[in-house]
Amino acid sequence: MEKQKAIAEAEKVLYKVYNRFPVVFDSGKGVKLYDTDGVEYLDFCAGIAVMGLGYDYPGFNDAVKAQIDKVYHLSNYFYNEPSIEAGEKLLKASGMDKVFFTNSGTEAIEGALKIAKRYAYNKGMGTDYEMIAMKHSFHGRSLGALSVTGNDHYQIPFAPLIPNIKFADFNDLDSVKALWNDKTCAVIMETIQGEGGIYPATEEFIKGVRALCDRSDALLILDEIQCGMGRSGSMFAWQGYGVKPDVMTTAKALGNGVPIGAFLAAGKAAMAMEPGDHGTTYGGNPLVCAAASKVLDIFEQDHIVDHVNEIGAYLWKKLDELKEKYDCIADHRGKGLIQGLEFTVPVGPIVSSALLEQKLVLISAGSNIIRFVPPLVIGEADVDEMVKRLEAAITETVK
């Protein structure tokens, strides 16, 4: 379909909750995307941190196609081998004890919240308990996930939400302590805040929160939906801090574009829920689990995390050089291949110019931060080309 016709048709039939760019992508290869006119784009968005292996990674497509030819859906009333294999590999990679596969990251958050509620209920707290979440966090757009998302912009139109959620300042342990009381049953936070501006947790903060939870028999829930699956330079970002959550969520790069998420629990949290407490129709079906299983194989066999550490350091160096060169860049932060540049000006025009003029796919985090979450398989030449195109966009738009 011709591009303008496709865009016009989309505006007629698709619910208007996105302000899309005027590009219609048709295919991908490696770290490149191609539109319906055959124009090549360098992708430093990866479908918002989803395409960890990029496009058409050797062996991945074949694994998905092979499962389609066998069976791609079964009820969870029965067992299927791909879910068992994916579960075993994910538990090995995380060190957690139990996993529940979902369709998305948002659904994984819903399950994690239910574990915390059920755990509190099992302890005899009834329903009179509180959770602590973080300001400027983002956990998803369902009502439960919105309830722990610390951003009024997302919350207000959909109030009232789940009650008894309090919001602390990320990386401020005293603010968590100030909210803590004998009704606190859980703390939920991203190990690295993504939408909130690419802020990694400090070691003091995450270890301090872990200690607070331990002293009060409360659960620590870590959201690894965006920063997990190797993106930070550890398979899961919390592994780089020497702490372990009671519950964690993952999604995005777990399926490399096939829609799958998961919540995982360890120790006491792994035994909190009982048959009938939770369920899903599509979650954990053979097709998505075959994809996740292959992704986990590739991560191990091709040493993807080692590559992230190597190329992440190179990206850091190049973005730091960019920060020193341009007065409009105020800060640079992140870890591995989840990094951000904070600008003194709105970044919307820069991102748009990069896409439409320089054929570089970038996304923002808030109004003044460019977020870099490329495929984990990028090379130094890709970083150099990205910087070249980004500089051109900055020069064009920041006068």
Image (cartoon, rainbow, N blue to C red):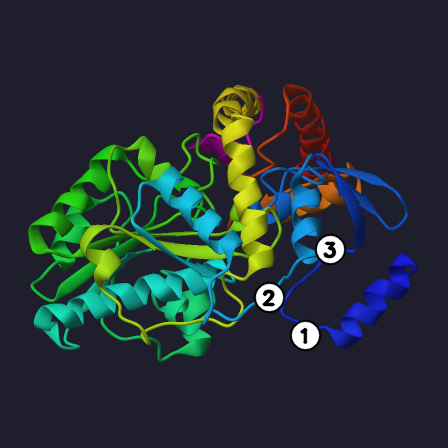
Q: Is residue 91 left or right of residue 129?
A: right
Which residue corresponds to the image point at 71% horizontal and 56% vertical from the top-left?
Answer: 69
Disc marking residue 21:
3
Q: Which residue is mark 2?
A: 73
- Of callouts 3 and 1, the N-terminal one: 1
Q: What crowding class fits label 3: few (fewer than 14 Cα within 10 Å), some (14-19), or many (20 or more)?
A: few
Q: Is residue 326 magenta?
A: yes
| Mark toward the viewer: 3 or 2 | 2
Residue at the extreme bottom: 160
User: Considering only vertical position in the picture, is 168 above or below 233?
Assistant: below
Name the kind of residue labelled 3 in the image. Phe
Residue 252 point in image, percent of width and height:
53, 50
* Image quarter of the C terminus: top right
Residue 333 point in image, percent of width and height:
44, 33
Disc marking residue 15:
1
Front position in the image: 151 or 315: 315
